[in-house]
Image (tube, rainbow, N blue to C red):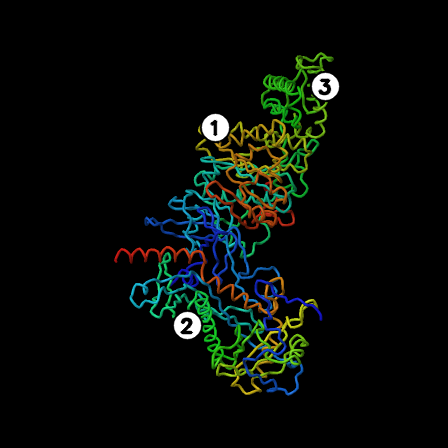
């Protein structure tokens, strides 16, 4: 039987082409697709070939381009003659295969005429290097419904860390995918014994979508359940969730949310914490703040505040004492700082700075009062301990920022990231600790390509050192080109949802093949392209609809006592 | 006298190559009144398009050769001439409601060594993992290389005629063959399609009828008896209307069928063939022999030529292996 006949007889899907215009190379080749078969984009194929010396080489690859031509016609208009039944022509479908793996690593082109098979089961695992990954994290499903997994070692810090997700807001489903990844990490057996202690901190910057992670969503149909099943994940909402929203202005720190109050904690920091933890700098996060002399003033004031916090008694009190005055709210704190720094009023905290710089510092500080004042409290009825964000209590902590002013958002992100970093640095044997995953959207705002800011420094720190601290950043942004390149470069996993056509051509997406770039602007919600270190081509995948509610109307009230988790 | 162009690209000749002498000596005997005694355009009634089989062939001279063996003998005749050639014939099916397709099973590829000497032997030459097998063919009356080329061409035409007769016997389809019919029994559904006018078989009055034909019309049948034993029925038909700068005969072809058929059957065949043609005509942009060279024929010729293999490769194989053989012969001598 000839190779061509064998291919037709059901053993293969196509034959390797070798012509001057479409030569086969060790890294990519074209297949003539058996007319009786369908090959589609993302199909995985396998070609075995034997070297003259007798070695067998297995080439695996993934279909990333397909063409169909009429053979034997020379003019475009000939298609009409062929369709009219006048001009004989053959139809040829060809598929380009991007090689994903060569085993053993003898890089030779497959010889023209070799039969290509569809890779299924173990063969597919080899093709996509899944067999080399010790611990699998489900990443999603191929369009054929087969699981696509990632190597945990590149996600938990052992060999690499961090995920970066790009895509147009609204259609790229960046946050949904990040949350799905968390679900996959926590509910698959990937983390093993570390799973119970692994934590996730999610900053919710848009809408209230993430305030219902613990509630079941609308009933999933059988197809969706089947998708969860084939990924080895339960179609269930998150079971261990802490929800925080900014405390509302006024005496009672009830959460400032639009749709859900129950189970949500209104958060604030005590003035003592603010001073002791040197969080003042996170009120000065405009990109140009660092370039001015403000930095020295901020440093000096922070030092003085930390000192004041240490000296204020009793140590458990939420307030501080400055210049003999008890400071019980942020406005008073700003006034006190103003007195202590303004030389005209006898201030001594910023003696070395020029008066104009001090004035600039004070102007900005005062401007922040209306935006962050309610998040920094020195007293009141509430027990401050119950309103600090404790990201280590539950498995997933959602901090809702979406109703906060931009300045306050930056403050919360900066202050919290700092706290988590400090906590991780305090661990002695970080290597064995369970990882903390931090989900942060709008990286372009917090770690922009240009300029410096305290938050950007924290994020860079996480990107560069987080791996060894077990602190994993799952960052997202509309456009990776506007994010600090070092942050993106440190990510082992790059994920792309729907991209703007011009954005897709930027160098930041160099990991996408030409075909993947073209597809990136066609992606529909729920479809992503994922690049991971061990697979040389990006893979297109789909992830199932969330099993948790994403809007108030979907969230069924929990069974049992509705007040059980009510919290003030 | 109006000046008109003939439409073919000049490297293919004129398309009309009959002598201009108004009363040329006719080699054949022609009876123009077999179907209608008075000549006028015949417009076939609207009919179901009929399935067609279009037969064609290609041939190629791969290399010329000379054999010296005979000269060494006392009554030697001098060097013998030879020619390595390849030919392929095949058919296209054009059927109503179906895509046109090249009938794979009809394709015949032959490589031959055509020689002037009767005892020429064939050659089997290694070509990579396969081989090229040149079968011997004796060309009895050949004395020049040009004669050998003509013999190769005849071999191709013979193969075409054999295939046409087979296809005619095998089904109901009308079989169009490129060129005049050559066999005594060409097949009762076989129609020869003559692109080039070599000879005026009819007088000026009848020719005027041919010039005035509309697309899809034909002249009445006329019967040709020539030196070959078989008589044929022939007719002119217009396949295309060209712009007035081209001569009116330029869109006209001559067709012929078996002369042993009853006249009524021949008329029917002529009507079918005439009405089938206009949709198969290429534009001048895609074929230098438009409108005569039919679309499926052009495609078939390309496919067949492709089957002959890469010309440079065949030539290199010949140079390499025939040389080896000579070296081998020298060593054994």
Q: CA distance from mark 2 to mark 1?
A: 104 Å
Q: CA distance from mark 2 to mark 3?
A: 116 Å
Q: Quadrant of residue B16?
A: bottom right
Q: Chain of mark 3?
A: A
Nearer to us of marks 2 and 1 is: 2
Q: Please say if B131 is above or below A180.
A: below
> In the image as oriented, which residue stretches furthest toward the right?
A344
Q: Chain of mark 2?
A: B
**Is B285 positioned to the left or the right of A5 in the image?**
right
Neighbourhood count class around disc 2 (C-alpha, 10 Å): few under 14, some 14–19, many 20 upward: few
Position in image of residue A223 (x %, y %): 53, 56
Position in image of residue A289 (x %, y %): 66, 24
Position in image of residue B229 (x %, y %): 48, 83
Which of the labelled discs sits on residue A359, or is there none? 3
Q: Residue at x 47, y 31 (%)?
A: A468
Disc 1: which residue: A427
Q: Do we see residue A18 in this rendering?
A: yes
Q: Please say if A516 is above or below B37.
A: above
Q: Do we see residue A559 in this rendering?
A: no
Asked whether A383 or A532 is in front, the reply is A532
Element on which disc 3 rests:
helix
**Is A475 positioned to the left or the right of B160 in the image?**
right
């Amino acid at each position: 039987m000839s190779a061509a006949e064998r291919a037709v007889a059901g053993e293969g899907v196509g034959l390797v082409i070798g012509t001057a215009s479409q030569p086969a190379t060790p890294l990519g080749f074209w297949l003539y697709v058996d007319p009786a078969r369908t090959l589609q984009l993302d199909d995985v194929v396998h070609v075995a070939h034997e070297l003259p010396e007798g070695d067998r080489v297995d080439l695996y690859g993934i279909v990333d381009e397909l063409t169909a031509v009429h053979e034997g016609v020379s003019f475009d208009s000939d298609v009409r003659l062929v369709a009219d039944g006048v001009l004989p022509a053959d139809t040829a479908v060809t598929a380009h295969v991007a090689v994903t793996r060569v085993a053993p690593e003898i890089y030779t082109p497959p010889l023209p005429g070799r039969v290509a098979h569809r890779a299924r089961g173990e063969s597919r695992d080899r093709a996509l290097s899944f067999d080399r990954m010790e611990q699998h994290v489900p990443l999603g499903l191929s369009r054929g419904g087969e699981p696509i997994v990632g190597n945990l070692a590149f996600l938990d810090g052992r060999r690499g860390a961090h995920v970066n997700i790009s895509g147009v807001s609204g259609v790229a489903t960046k946050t949904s995918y990040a949350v799905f990844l968390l679900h996959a990490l926590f509910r698959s057996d990937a983390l093993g014994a570390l799973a119970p202690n692994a934590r996730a901190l999610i900053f919710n910057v848009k809408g209230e979508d993430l305030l219902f992670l613990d509630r079941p969503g609308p009933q999933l149909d059988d197809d969706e359940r089947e998708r969860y099943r084939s990924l080895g994940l339960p179609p269930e909402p998150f079971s261990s969730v802490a929800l925080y929203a900014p405390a509302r202005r006024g005496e009672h720190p009830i959460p400032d949310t639009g749709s859900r109050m129950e189970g949500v904690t209104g958060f604030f920091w005590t003035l003592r914490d603010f001073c002791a933890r040197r969080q003042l700098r996170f009120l000065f996060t405009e990109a140009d703040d660092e370039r001015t002399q403000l930095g020295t003033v901020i440093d000096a004031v922070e030092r003085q505040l930390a000192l004041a916090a240490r000296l204020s008694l009793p140590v458990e009190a939420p307030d501080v004492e400055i210049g003999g005055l008890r400071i019980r709210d942020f406005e008073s704190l700003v006034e006190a700082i103003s007195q202590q720094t303004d030389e005209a009023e006898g201030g001594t905290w910023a003696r070395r700075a020029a008066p104009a710089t001090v004035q600039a510092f004070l102007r900005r500080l005062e401007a922040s009062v209306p935006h962050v004042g309610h998040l920094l409290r020195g007293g009141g009825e509430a027990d401050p301990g119950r309103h600090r964000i404790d990201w280590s209590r539950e498995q997933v902590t959602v901090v809702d920022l979406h109703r906060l002013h931009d300045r306050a958002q930056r403050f919360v992100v900066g202050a919290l990231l700092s706290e988590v970093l400090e906590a991780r640095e305090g661990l002695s044997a970080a290597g064995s600790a369970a990882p903390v995953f931090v989900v942060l959207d709008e990286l372009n705002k917090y770690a922009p390509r240009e300029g410096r800011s305290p938050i950007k420094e924290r994020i860079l720190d996480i990107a560069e050192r987080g791996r060894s601290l077990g602190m994993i950043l799952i960052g997202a942004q509309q456009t990776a080109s506007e994010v600090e390149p070092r942050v993106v470069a440190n990510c082992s996993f790059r994920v792309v949802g729907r991209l703007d056509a011009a954005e897709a051509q930027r160098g930041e997406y160099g990991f996408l093949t030409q075909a993947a770039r073209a597809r990136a602007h066609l992606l529909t919600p729920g479809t992503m392209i994922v690049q991971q270190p061990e697979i040389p081509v990006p893979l297109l995948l789909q992830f199932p609809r969330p099993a948790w509610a994403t809007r108030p109307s979907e969230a069924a009230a929990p069974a049992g006592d509705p007040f059980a988790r009510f919290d003030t | 006298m109006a000046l008109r162009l003939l439409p073919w690209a000049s490297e293919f000749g004129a398309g009309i190559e009959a002598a201009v002498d108004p009363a040329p000596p006719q080699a054949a005997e022609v009876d123009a009144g077999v179907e209608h005694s008075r000549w006028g355009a015949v417009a076939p009634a609207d009919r179901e398009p009929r399935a067609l089989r279009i037969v064609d062939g290609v041939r190629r001279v791969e290399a010329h050769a000379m054999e010296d063996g005979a000269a060494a003998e006392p009554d030697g005749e001098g060097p013998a001439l030879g020619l390595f050639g390849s030919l392929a014939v095949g058919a296209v099916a054009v059927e109503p409601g179906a895509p046109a397709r090249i009938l794979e099973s009809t394709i015949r590829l032959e490589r031959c060594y055509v020689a002037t000497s009767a005892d020429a032997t064939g050659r089997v030459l290694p070509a990579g993992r396969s081989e090229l097998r040149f079968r011997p063919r004796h060309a009895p009356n050949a004395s020049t290389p040009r004669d050998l080329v003509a013999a190769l061409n005849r071999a191709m035409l013979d193969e075409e005629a054999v295939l046409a007769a087979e296809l005619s016997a095998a089904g109901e389809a009308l079989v169009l063959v490129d060129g005049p019919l050559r066999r005594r029994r060409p097949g009762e559904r076989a129609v020869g399609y003559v692109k080039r006018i070599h000879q005026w078989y009819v007088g000026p009055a009848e020719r005027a009828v041919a010039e005035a034909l509309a697309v899809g019309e034909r002249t009445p049948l006329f019967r040709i008896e020539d030196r070959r034993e078989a008589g044929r029925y022939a007719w002119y038909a217009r396949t295309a209307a060209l712009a007035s700068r081209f001569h009116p005969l330029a869109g006209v072809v001559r067709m012929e069928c078996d002369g042993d058929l009853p006249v009524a059957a021949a008329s029917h065949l002529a009507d079918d063939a005439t009405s089938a043609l206009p949709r198969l005509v290429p534009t001048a942009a895609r074929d230098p022999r438009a409108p005569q060279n039919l679309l499926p024929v052009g495609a078939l010729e390309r496919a067949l030529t492709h089957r002959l293999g890469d010309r440079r490769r065949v030539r290199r194989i010949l140079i390499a292996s025939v040389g080896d053989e000579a070296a081998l012969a020298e060593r054994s001598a």
